[in-house]
Image (spheres, coloured by chain):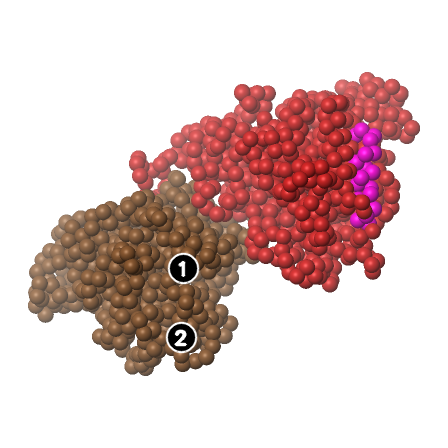
Chain colours: A red, B brown
Amino acid sequence: MKPEIMEVDLHRLKVSDPFFGQYQQLVRDVVIPYQWDALNDRIAEAEPSHAIENFRIAAGRQQGEFYGMVFQDSDVAKWLEAVAWSLCQKPDAELEKTADEVIELIAAAQCEDGYLNTYFTAKAPDKRWSNLAECHELYCAGHMIEAGVAFFQATGKRSLLNVVCRFADYIDSVFGKEEHKLHGYPGHPEVELALMRLYEVTQEPRYLNLSRYFVEARGTQPHYYDIEFEKRGGTSHWLIYGAGWMTHDKDYSQAHLPLADQQTAIGHAVRFVYLMTGVAHLARLSQDEEKRQICLRLWKNMAQRQLYITGGIGSQGRGEAFSCDYDLPNDTVYAESCASIGLMMFARRMLEMEADSQYADVMERALYNTVLGGMALDGKHFFYVNPLEVQPNVLKFNHIYDHIKPVRQRWFGCACCPPNIARTLTSIGHYIYTPRPEALYINLYIGNRVTVPVNGGELGLKISGNFPWQERVEISIDSPQPVAHTLALRLPDWCDKPQVLLNGSPAEGEVRKGYLHIRRDWGAGDTLTLTLPMPVRRVYGNPQVRHVAGKVALQRGPLVYCLEEADNGALLHNLSLPKESAFTAIEGKGIFAHNVLIQAQGYRQSPKQQGEQPLWHYDTAPGARQDHTLTFIPWFSWANRGEGEMRIWVDEA
Amino acid sequence: MKPEIMEVDLHRLKVSDPFFGQYQQLVRDVVIPYQWDALNDRIAEAEPSHAIENFRIAAGRQQGEFYGMVFQDSDVAKWLEAVAWSLCQKPDAELEKTADEVIELIAAAQCEDGYLNTYFTAKAPDKRWSNLAECHELYCAGHMIEAGVAFFQATGKRSLLNVVCRFADYIDSVFGKEEHKLHGYPGHPEVELALMRLYEVTQEPRYLNLSRYFVEARGTQPHYYDIEFEKRGGTSHWLIYGAGWMTHDKDYSQAHLPLADQQTAIGHAVRFVYLMTGVAHLARLSQDEEKRQICLRLWKNMAQRQLYITGGIGSQGRGEAFSCDYDLPNDTVYAESCASIGLMMFARRMLEMEADSQYADVMERALYNTVLGGMALDGKHFFYVNPLEVQPNVLKFNHIYDHIKPVRQRWFGCACCPPNIARTLTSIGHYIYTPRPEALYINLYIGNRVTVPVNGGELGLKISGNFPWQERVEISIDSPQPVAHTLALRLPDWCDKPQVLLNGSPAEGEVRKGYLHIRRDWGAGDTLTLTLPMPVRRVYGNPQVRHVAGKVALQRGPLVYCLEEADNGALLHNLSLPKESAFTAIEGKGIFAHNVLIQAQGYRQSPKQQGEQPLWHYDTAPGARQDHTLTFIPWFSWANRGEGEMRIWVDEA
């Protein structure tokens, strides 16, 4: 195995398709300014953030007390990363100036020794590194490092990169195997993947080694969380679920065993995918076969047994966590937006290591369903939790739904998701392509234009189409000089009979691990026309999954569909879809303009009698059912018309 | 409305049918001795009780510290009540001697002023009455009062009655409207119903008035829970879910509003039905129309919108509580055994007030399903929580199942249920009949022999049959002298075409509110032959209940049936029952000997492919299904063959 991924500025590609272009514009015009207001506490009716003020306080520029989560800094870091990628897409002098000022403030908040964390600097300076299990210091460090890397890659400015290198150097002086160092590692993984990114831009081996140290120390005995717990007198930062649980329930943070001994995706879902993103990156760059096997094994368990049809992960609210194989409840699910973002990151690293389309299939599923669904169409409301079925009027009465919101919120006390969505949408180029020496892998069919260096030359190409609504995608080459290279086109798992034409004739190539490899001297004017038929497809659950037995879901292209009360009336559970019903794809209106909606003839179970019914009735058959036209909308756009019922899985009559 | 119920020693009737007789024998021979051992901490592998030892400590006869729940005393009281009724059924000198000794010990633990509670006497004597919201003092008082009443009714001995009258007198001196008294009321209702029972045997109006005081003070402003909370400095006895919640979440204990303003069954289910049992008793005996309306309204909400097919109540684990209308999940349900016992008590008081068979229908449903199901067939294992669907291998991984056990337990740290089941089964006579001046109402068709005073004479009758397995029940009269009276036979809700013969000819009578009223001069030799056809019936859920949409349950007579893994293999959710399938009633074997099991031809959804399957597949139809013979067992007897899957509601193919 060789570290074969090529360094290409994929964040510089220009997104041009109608669907994703609109999203990127929304992020630029609405999401980034909105979130900047949120970080500065200027959004009425939103939970306060105080994140920028915390930096001012830590920098000594303002009096006051730290406020917010112990990881509040990371919201600023993620916002900066979103800004960085956005500036790549479209320069914006005013925005860049704001970012520069924020970076200057961050630098001012950095301690002499390189340490950087407003909670500990402003509120608990003597508690530094005393509670890695619970206090997110290395998590915040990781996000700041990511921001520093991104800002450098996007703008060429080293301002934040210098800050985070100093910070990383300091961390490296504190943590490690050496006797005089702390033998700890983060409760919330993130610094591992960040150090790998920092290594990629700096080529400083200490960063890779530190990442490896954190990965390999994790879960070893004697257990560091217990040691630090005792050392600090058994205090806990978090009291929810009772004191000390975050230290004691070590599988919550994937620290119950060394990774080499772990067999299943477990614990807090975001922690899991962030950790594995770092491990996969490390495995590739250090050519570590054992770590590669860990990645393959844990990916397989997650993707084959613990993944929702929506690309969501984390089946339970408590601990925002995985539960166990095939336990995929639709209504009490967690499926945090950040977890699906982390899943995309993990998938991307797996693609860089393996070039197997199964990773891209999952990445696409997460992107077009849970990640997009995490943000409202207005760019100003967000889901933290992404259920597959909601009955709004029950949520506040049954505690199993305590974590479920029926509509997106303006902001959160724990606001990890909104800026995470923003930075993911603006950096989408990293996910569209995997450039390797032997081929340029095309993972996602998002319209864009990019130039990739190939063997001293340049391969310029443009993807156009109207994905995910239309099945035809065109890939045209505009290299000034012909270049010999392989284009590897992903054949999506949801597509039965993809057709590929090269300049009008059937393209010849070899299918390997889900990619059609076409090698040739690509020159200006060459055009690949890809047709990915998108009939509405019935999707059935694995028979191990009890929550979807007897039910069917609809998918068209990568999009999972759902029923909403707004189109179908209340009590969606009484609707059923006959096996033989045909589907009509129709164009939506209003907020669904240009979107494809689906209709089908189905049934509505009607009440047995008029008036108050008994809770059960004895009969030879249930009440009569009436014909009912079922209207399905893309699930990512649910809850954009106010509060109402929603469900993805429908009884098949 | 008149307080028309007659005082009849219904606990003295002799149960004789094969089914319930066996249960009563089990209680006598196994359950009562077993629970006595448990109360004395002599059961290996069971959670310790310490309940008897607490009394020894409080009585000053032993050194040591109180151990257990703040309401540990109530387990002893319920055990004593079970013993009292058992002695009625079958004298047992040794058992009576043990009970006498326990009562002597209880009397020794009573304080000079009449106060009786081992927790406060032994552990926190200065905290008496300082935390009614959380600390169960009046709850324990109520159970001890019930035991005193029962022991007196059963044996004629006043030993415990005297103790509890002293205690009740003391409570009456402490609580009430008068300015010098505390204006509090219990966090856990129970004393209200107990005082009504004490009033019935003593005819002391102070007890009825005190019960009324507690009912009417409940939920008024300024709120007593807040007052005492502040007075004791905001301390909390329970820290689960965070300090103070039991004080602040007032709907948990039905204290958020005065009862007159409450519209729905709410909060902790056991508290609700215990409270309503007292209110219904009070409403009848004080001819209080407003309280009667409260009972009718809250019964209706509970029975029509929040009751499981199993007679279980309490849809959620948190707070062991109701959730909201039509929210009846099968797998995360609570349905505490004690709640269904309390439901039987509430139903019995409603019957005494209203003589409407709807109350008896619910009572029978709770008895034959959840209450019986709460105890293992061996009499030594108990369910606290009674799910309608279990997948054992998931329980420890997903926190929504934290409260669910896949098999019955030997004992509980909170052991309210086991002795509650015992006292209910031994006092079953109270539920079989409702004797009123105008008629003897027969609610349950449990074989028994009883003599009821009627107009100066005596009506002796015997019910025989093999209910609930066989449809024929015989009621024969053996009064020495003919007596003119009305027998009112309940026509069960589950029975379409009941037939009643009087001495071989169709009986004539009038059906009123679900009872067939037959008036005549009943003389020795008169026989009513009741045939209650018990075909296997398909039961369908109210269309409001999303958890059972598209599903069917089976019921035969009063028994709800279920599928178990032991008979049907794993992954029960893949089984379906076609609409047209016929049913075969078969006789069970082994632990099901003499029981009626049900078989039907159905299907099993088979895996689409061999080997590891993807989590979902796209296809025009789900995988093939194979013929499969479904075997259903009575739900009350599930989990008597070790751990395995179980479900009541099955997909209707």
**Image height check: is A504 above or below B298?**
above
Specify whether residue A164 is painted magenta.
yes
The residue tagged 1 is B131
Segment tinted magenta in the rendering: A154-172
Q: Quadrant of residue B121?
A: bottom left
Front residue of A242 and B184: B184
Q: Position of residue B217 (x, y in %)?
A: 30, 52
Q: Main secondary structure of the magenta part?
A: helix
* Residue type indicated by callout 2: Ala
Residue, x 39% and y 49% (percent of image)?
B251
Most distant residue in the right direction: A456
Q: Amino acid at mark 1?
A: Asn
Q: Tell which of B543 and A90 is nearer to you.
A: A90
Q: Return the disc, 2 or 1, that comes first in the chain's sequence.
A: 2
Q: Residue furthest top?
A: A525
Q: Find disc 2 in the rendering and name its residue.
A: B58
Q: Nearer the viewer, residue A365 or B608?
A: A365
Q: Quadrant of the C terminus of chain B?
A: top left
Chain ID, mark 1: B
- For mark 1, does the 10 Å Cα neighbourhood hold few (<14), some (14 to 19), or many (20 or more) residues? many
The residue tagged with tag 2: helix, strand or loop?
helix
- For residue A7, which quarter of the picture? top right
The answer to whether mark 2 and mark 1 are in CB contact below 8 A is no
Q: Is residue A151 visible?
A: yes
Q: Is residue B337 left or right of residue A264?
A: left
Q: Position of residue B466 (x, y in %)?
A: 28, 63
- Looking at the rendered structure, the secondary structure element under dot 1 is loop
Residue B238 drawn at (x, y percent) = 47, 59
**Residue at 54 percent of width and 29 percent of height:** A640
Q: Chain of mark 2?
A: B
Q: Estimate the x, y position of residue A609 in percent, counting from the top left.
A: 31, 37
Q: Is residue B324 above or below residue B379?
A: above
